[in-house]
Amino acid sequence: MNKENIKTEMIVEDRKINVLMVDNQDYISLTDLARYADEEEPRLPIQNWMRNKDVILYLGLWEQLNSKDFKRVEFDAFKNEAGSNKFKVSPQKWIKETNAKGIISKSGRYDGGTFAHPDIAFEFASWLSPEFKLYLIQEFQRLKKNEAYQNKIDWHANRVLAKANYLVHTDAIKSYIVPTLTEKQKRFVYAEEADVLNVALFGMTAKEWRESNPDIADKGNIRDYTDLLHLVILNNLENINAELIEMGISQSERLIKLNCMAKRQMELLKNNTTFNNLEYIENKINNKEELLQ
């Protein structure tokens, strides 16, 4: 499975239920749901559920409707045996022999288990308990609503940030606030490119910031404690610095250029309406996160 899978969770009847997003599709943990019936051996309720003929027919129909790669001939063998006393099936066997996509099996000590498309997970939850299924649907809908809200905020934030960066690249104005470099800073050779940016924007290296802020240095770095305005400018400086390096410009020259650019961008953005909208969005997101904690 893709290493970029996104994992989140929801709480249903005081139980943590993991949700895995694979290729933009949600899969609910059957393993977590099965603990409703068997805390110690959650694989057993899943296997018992899959032995039912109606369940196999449902799974097969779902695959035929949603996957062109589903092996129908192999499915017929499951369909013919389902419901008999000798019929035994596991999620892994079902996936391997039929090339099923609605159920996935993930190995791993902490995030492994069996996951299923919501259509299938809801059916399993109904088999466990109709009441439990209703709570599951309610929490899943709440989770998706929160995700939709967050995606809307993220999209708007990116759009506003793009506007702010456009202003940076199309306007020029004299400024202040960003520290003016000393002659010593201009001549000094910095071992890390990150410190070139730090000095250009903040007027100090990461080490100098830690020494000046011992009470909070163990909780983060200079960039963790700066504001959104500085972070936007820092992002722009990183891109500009990369281009200057490709042009073969020396570190000392780059430092001076970056410092001048930081000053111009600071003055341009600090009172700009578009950027103020971005700060508004950031505060809105932070307030939402505080409410959810």
Image: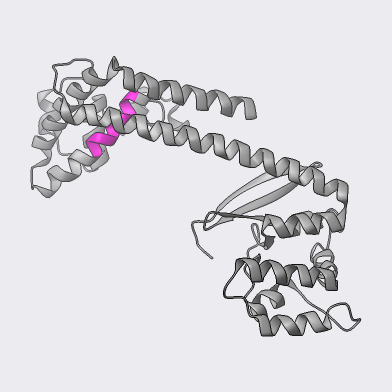
- Expressed as whole percent of the image width and height from the top left, the position of residue 275 reads 33, 22
Report the side of 214 relative to 66 (left or right): left
List x then y, in percent, for residue 109.
65, 62
Up the image or down, 71 lies above or below 150; here it is below
Figure check: 30 above or below 16: below
Judged by its main secondary structure, the magenta piece is helix
Q: Is residue 207 visible?
A: no
Which color scheme did the rendering employ for the protein?
A: one colour
Query: Which part of the image, by quadrant, shows the C terminus?
Result: top right
Residue 208 placement, left or right of 186: right
Task: Kindly identify the residue that appears in the image at 74 percent across and 57 percent down.
Answer: 121
Q: Is residue 148 visible?
A: yes
- Residue at image coords 29%, 27%: 164
Q: Is residue 218 left or right of residue 236?
A: right
Please say if 3 is above or below 131. below
Q: Can you tell which quarter of the image residue 38 is in?
A: bottom right
Q: Quadrant of residue 52?
A: bottom right
66 in magenta: no
Q: Nearer the viewer, residue 47 or 229?
A: 47
Instruction: Tell me the residue at 66%/46% (across/down).
Output: 9
The magenta region covers: 229-238
Which image quarter: residue 204?
top left
Percent x, y of residue 55: 80, 68
Count of marks, rendered view: 0
- Quadrant of image for the N terminus: bottom right
Where residue 16 sits: x, y (%)? 73, 46
Residue at x 81%, y 70% (from the top left corner): 47
Q: Nearer the viewer, residue 258 or 126?
A: 126
Residue in the foreground of this view, choosing between 257 and 148: 148
* Residue at the front extreme of this rendering: 65
